Amino acid sequence: MSAEENEAYSMSAEENEAYSMSAEENEAYSMSAEENEANSMSAEENEAYSMSAEENEANSMSAEENEAYSMSAEENQ
């Protein structure tokens, strides 16, 4: 019975050879992953830009306040 189990394990060993081929593909993917790390650096820059975009939202809020002030300025006229 254990001999039959060994046959089953040897079959999975052949499957492991197939997996090792995909492992080599994974090495190729890991190279692109390193490229993605470089892209993630620019993504962090994008986060910084999005922070300034949020600041722009705050500035647009003050622009709405300016509209309110211009309305009161018209009232003052």
Image (cartoon, grey):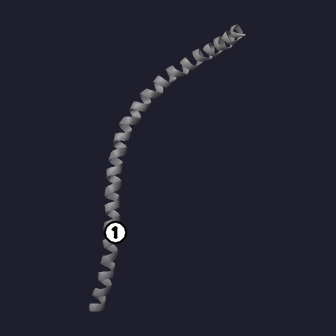
Residue located at (55% from left, 22% from top) = 22
Relative to 46, say whether 70 is above or below.
below
Residue 24 placement (x, y as % from top left) = 50, 20
Relative to 77, say whether 50 is above or below.
above
Secondary structure under badge 1?
Answer: helix
Residue 17 seen: yes
Examine the image and state in which quarter residue 9 appears: top right
Examine the image and state in which quarter residue 5 appears: top right
User: Is 19 on the left-hand or right-hand side of 6?
Assistant: left
The front one of 31 and 7 is 7
Relative to 22, say whether 54 is above or below.
below
The front one of 14 and 6 is 6
The N terminus - image quarter? top right
Neighbours of disc 1 within 10 Å: few (<14), some (14-19), many (20+): few
Residue located at (27% from left, 86% from top) = 73
Residue matched to label 1: 60
Residue 55 placement (x, y as % from top left) = 31, 62
The amino acid pointed to by label 1 is: Ser
Residue located at (32% from left, 85% from top) = 71
